[in-house]
Image (spheres, helix red, strand yellow):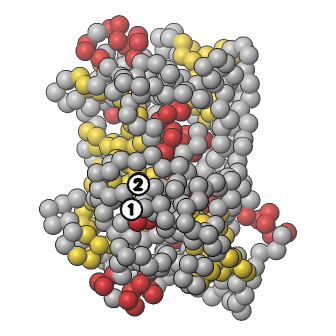
Amino acid sequence: MRSLWFGVLACAALLVACSDNDSDVTTPPSGDSSSSEDILSSSSVEPSSGLVESSSSSLAALATPCKTETEDNCEYGELTDDRDGKKYKTVKIGDQWWMAENLNYETGSNFCFSYGDTNCVKYGRLYAWGDAMDSAGTWSTNGKGCGRFGKDCSPIYPVRGICPNGWHLPDTTEWATLLAAVGGREIAGKKLKSMSGWYDYKGEKGGGTDDFGFSALPAGLLGDDGYYDEGEDAYFWSSVQRRSIDAYEVFLCNQWDKAEMSKFTGSKDYPISVRCIKDDVPGQTAQFSSSSAKSSSSVTPQSSSSVTPLSSDSETSVSSSSSVTLATPCKTKSEDNCEYVKLVDVRDGQAYKTVKIGDQWWMAENLNFRTDSSFCFDHEERNCTMYGRLYTWAAASSACPSGWHLPSVTEFENLFTAVGGSSTGGLKLKATSSWYDGGNGTDDFGFSAISTGIMDYDMNYHFREGNNAFFWSSSENDPNNALFMSLLYDKDIADLSSHFKSFGVAVRCIKD
């Protein structure tokens, strides 16, 4: 097995092992959105003028469990791929239609586990990222040029990729919506894994409950030295690259109940599984630049004695009781209609602009409250005024004003979802100035992230001049490392990364 360090597929032998790491998924927030009035908590807040209520343009629906060991009442369909006539079971989970089997469309450069054709029937095929994205542009041009290891690209979303017509390769937001719909990252693996086919681990059952009919099987992967992880792990591509050498994947393991959305994969060239999602889900109209593909795949209801389709009345039972609100862009170069209020920190009297994004209230400036183990960039007090302070993780954990707190990974992920997904979140959250070499953002929601830099454990300072911005989360990666949001001048992505807790990193607080 190969080892994952925060989802990194890398070790000398490229063997794989499950590891416990926090990563890229979204779970629904608890509680209702805050108003300008109820944000007046134990910290003093003064409403600003000209406030406009942010409105929801879409909701991520929570799904109702529909399958047990004795009953299966999920809403299924059947997808016929007109390219080769293969049929696939599909399932509705929340507001999304997913393939309930892995793709098994044969091209000249995909693989059956251990080169066995029967494994393709069982697990589907394994695809390198470029093949999954249809880098050659055979079926559409949305992923054209998104090729192999070391090749950068800018796909047009959604990306059909290798999927049948009418379906596409899911992006990170769509994967995050699925993980949220089944109850959140911490239990999503258990809910999505099939009931059988998984190896047990230390006497514990390695399979899942398959509560929603997704039926993920441990298909493993193909690495540099051969095939690995059958029975232990399932990997599924997304359509979002991380860097020119790697892309995002969703990862399920027999050792735990959670689902990972990894930040780094070992290589775009490692073939793994593909699950496609149906176009034109609520709030999305898929538009593809067509290529040579002309056939249309068909989806028909699947009849089965073990399946009872949901009626139109029962649709209500799938609707969300807790959801991630997508924010409406409220700021342009010429207008700013975002909902702001002023937060006054009663500990030192400093005032901060705060902004409502979806259902969350965020500080729109970096924290500048002096604590032990907090620092000004280059030890210059004026940099604290401009950029806020840099905090070790321990100091950051208790630095926010009363009524506010250090955001968790889930709250950062909810932010990414609210602004349209992590793949473009960096562009939308970065300020319109201060970033190096054309790396400014559009600041569509008033978050106004400026480049802050970082301090290492030797008290050396790095990267202030427009390169990046890092913000601590409250979530640990392991005893020595914690997770932070990362924005880079040369990427549109809003990312989550891990580093030593002793490093000095900026803080944005979120309202309780």
Q: Looking at the image, can residue 32 be seen?
A: yes
Q: Nearer the viewer, residue 206 or 131?
A: 131
- Whole-percent x, y for residue 105 in the image: 48, 78
Q: Residue at x 58, y 34 (%)?
A: 512
Asked if residue 362 is positioned above or below residue 217 in the image, the reply reads above
Q: Amino acid at mark 1?
A: Trp
Say the numbered circle drawn on residue 146. 2
Which element type, helix, strand or loop, lies under badge 1?
helix
* Mark 2, other Cα within 10 Å: few <14 / some 14–19 / many ≥20: many
Does 193 sit left or right of 451 as displayed? Answer: right
Residue at left offset 47%, top offset 60%:
137
Please identify, in this view, whether the residue under mark 2 or under mark 1 is nearer the observer: 2
Kind of residue at disc 2: Cys
* Residue carrying label 1: 129
The reply to whether callout 2 and callout 1 are in contact (CB within 8 Å) is: yes
* x and y percentages locating residue 153 in the rendered image: 40, 48
Residue at 40% in and 91% down? 118
Question: Mark number for residue 441?
Answer: none
